[in-house]
Image: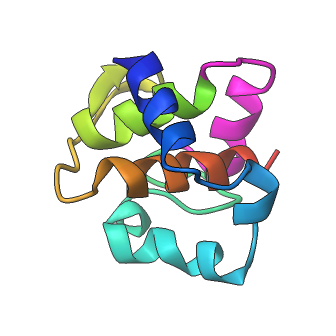
């Protein structure tokens, strides 16, 4: 599934991570419920996006893993507070969010 998301993103011709790093993306995450638990540079209920990016730096599968986590949720990667699934976020939006997060290193 991880590879499928990445392949889907590439097949759709989505831009590279650096192309997503703009003011629109700095606000986009707020439209997808991310802001309920995450902030860019400080931990709240969930880890900061900068902490997430730092944790996955150097991981070639990070974007696909994060996109999957956004859509399916999970628990255990950051403690016992669960990340709820976000099925209202499309696969393309999840990839966009994951790419943006990885630019925040």
Q: Position of residue 44 (x, y in %)?
A: 50, 55
Q: Which residues are magenta?
A: 47-61
Q: Nearer the viewer, residue 20 or 44?
A: 20
Where does residue 78 sit, x and y in percent of width and height?
48, 26
Is 105 left, or right, of 83 in this rendering?
right
User: Which residue sits at x=35%, y=66%?
Assistant: 36
Residue at left offset 28%, top offset 41%: 71
x and y percent of residue 100 in the render?
Answer: 65, 55
In the image, residue 61 above or below residue 103: above
Please state which of residues 73 and 25 is positioned toward the viewer in this rendering.
25
The count of marks equals: 0
Task: Name the one closer to the observer, 12 or 24.
Answer: 12
Figure quadrant of residue 58: top right
* Residue 20 percent across, percent down from the top left: 69, 63
Compared with 53, 79 (above or below) is above
Instruction: Say if the magenta span includes residue 97.
Output: no
Colour scheme of the picture: rainbow
Which quadrant does the C terminus fall into?
top right
Q: Left of 2 or right of it: where is 58?
A: right
Tell me the quarter of the image containing the N terminus: top left
Q: Is residue 72 left or right of residue 31?
A: left
Q: Does the magenta run of residues contain 49? A: yes
Quarter of the image for residue 24 reads: bottom right
- In percent of the image, x 57 and y 62: which residue is there? 39
Please name the residue shown 70% across and 19% down the image. Answer: 60
């Amino acid at each position: 599934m991880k590879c499928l998301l990445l392949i889907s993103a590439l097949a759709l011709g989505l831009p590279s991570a650096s192309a997503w790093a703009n003011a629109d993306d700095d606000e986009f995450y707020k439209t997808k419920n991310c802001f309920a638990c995450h902030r860019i540079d400080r931990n709240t209920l969930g880890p900061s996006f900068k902490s997430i990016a730092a944790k996955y730096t150097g991981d070639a599968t990070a974007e696909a893993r994060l996109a999957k986590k956004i859509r399916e949720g999970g628990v255990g990667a950051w403690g016992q507070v669960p990340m709820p699934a976000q099925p209202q976020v499309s696969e393309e939006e999840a990839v966009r969010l994951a790419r943006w997060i990885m630019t925040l290193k």
